[in-house]
Amino acid sequence: MWKNLLATRPISPTGHVDAGEPVEGSLEGEVTFKRVLTAKHLVMLGLGAVIGAGIFVITGTAAANHAGPAIMLSFVVAGFACAMAALCYAEFAAMIPASGSAYSYTYATLGEALAWFVGWSLVLEYLFAASTVAVGWSGYTVSFLDSVGLHLPVALTQAPINFCTHEAAQAGTCEFGRFVLTGALFNLPAVLVVGAVGALCYIGITQSSTANAIIVTLKVAVILLLILFGAQYVNPENWVPFIPENQGGDRFGWAGMLRGASIVFFAYIGFDAVSTAAQEVKNPQRDMPIGILGSLVLCTLIYIGVSAVLTGLVPYSTLATAKPVVTAIENFPALGWLKVAVELAAIAGLTTVILVMLMGQPRIFYAMSKDGLLPRFFSAVHTRFRTPHKGTVLVALVAALMAALLPIQLLGDVVSMGTLVAFATVCLGVMVLRRTRPELHRPFRAPAVYLVGTLGVLACLGLVAIMPLFNWIVLLCWTLLGLCVYIGYGYRHSKLRQR
């Protein structure tokens, strides 16, 4: 039994277009994904996934509730942990360019049981990420429609339940940590955007990546305008004290800065999503490291710049809204013209995050299904569009349901935890494979792998350790549910065990 759980999947080289692999299908005639993406597409996918919720939604919440102006340090800490993981991801992605991302890498190094745990954590990560960003998208969309005179009913723009934050508890409106009824029906805009993006993912990877590239170009241009013009109105007094005095627990101080890092880590899941497109890349051995590392470096610089401007424009305590960037700009009439541009960029930018998340999750399901750990339903590929169409429809439906009913405070935290668990496992796996299979060809090699891998594991697990008890309970319940699925289906149907 124990030996079966630790069984690893053999590593075989993956073809690419430059080596004679067909653009569509496989050499055996099986219907598979199209190999049409390049390094440029991958960097754009990374920017599309990473630059979105972190700037337009999560930054304000983390600064107002935990880090204050030290949110800039939070991004540095999270970026460091992410950089260690990114180097390990790049080595794996070039060597094992599979759509399963961290799941596939873990299966090849640490065994089937842990691979299932990682794959199941990725389900938590991507589903909740798409839902979280859809809620943020709804907030910005409603704000934009209000500014042009179109007012949607409150009952159709909020979740029916909310999570009581520190600020609400201090105001005496609710008890911290409890769920409260809002009186709303469901978040209609969030449902509509998930449905529209899901339809685009259904149609094809080429259409999805092209739409993503266009939108990314526009939103990066607006963000650079925000940094350039917003910097002229920064009040350095808003950065004092840079690390606010601790108010107990993870409310500010160094503990709050680290807690902020664990929250904004949510913003960095984009490069993980890049690795799920590996089976659709023309030359993954060369292009995957470029896409993963290139998008990470660019995004980290942009995040630090935006967080500096936001906390410099207004007191950090005012940023705890669903649209913190607009909240900061509204205090400066001279930046009124930028408010509309930021709202449009946020709407477009958050759309690309949802797009990449809804692209990634069905492909992880596809990899798990091809290994027999999930039903064949998830490995079905559309004969015309070459996409995992059935998995895409299911993922979109579940994501839309969660976005309609759950609050953003709950969704964002859970995503970060699932992400950190997956990253720590990848860092461990790359060190294990260097020991067990040193002869394998590695198109990209992580430098000082044992140092990088160890720092990555420690940084990721350290950020997990400081998360609140509620997050641990959610992860435990999710893991137990996944264990039931694995015992009930995956263990008995594993193709590796059958062979």
Image (cartoon, helix red, strand yellow):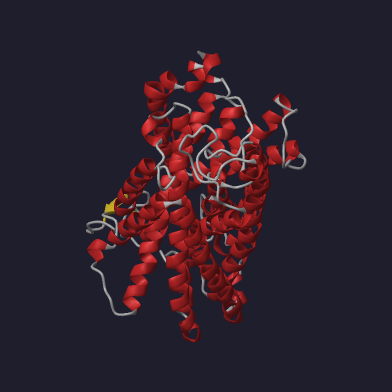
Where in the figure is residue 179, as x and y percent of width and height? 31, 50
Would residue 452 appear left or right of 466 to someone viewing this image? right
Task: Judge by depth and name the residue closer to the eye, 81 or 470.
Answer: 81
Residue under the image location 40 percent in, 42 percent down = 383
Task: Judge by depth and name the residue closer to the eye, 256 or 340.
Answer: 340
Residue extending farthest right: 448
Please, is residue 309 above or below residue 426 in the view?
below
Where is residue 149, by image quadrant? bottom left
Where in the figure is residue 357, as x and y percent of width and height? 46, 50
Please, is residue 373 above or below residue 149 in the view?
above
Would residue 384 appear left or right of 21 to someone viewing this image? left
Q: Tell me if residue 170 can be seen.
A: no
Residue extending farthest bottom: 334
Task: Judge by depth and name the residue closer to the eye, 372 or 30.
Answer: 30
Q: Tell me if residue 253 can be seen.
A: yes
Where is residue 339, by image quadrant? bottom left
Would residue 219 appear left or right of 296 to someone viewing this image? left
Task: Judge by depth and name the residue closer to the eye, 239 or 116.
Answer: 116
Please, is residue 130 above or below residue 242 in the view?
above
Please, is residue 415 above or below residue 234 in the view?
above
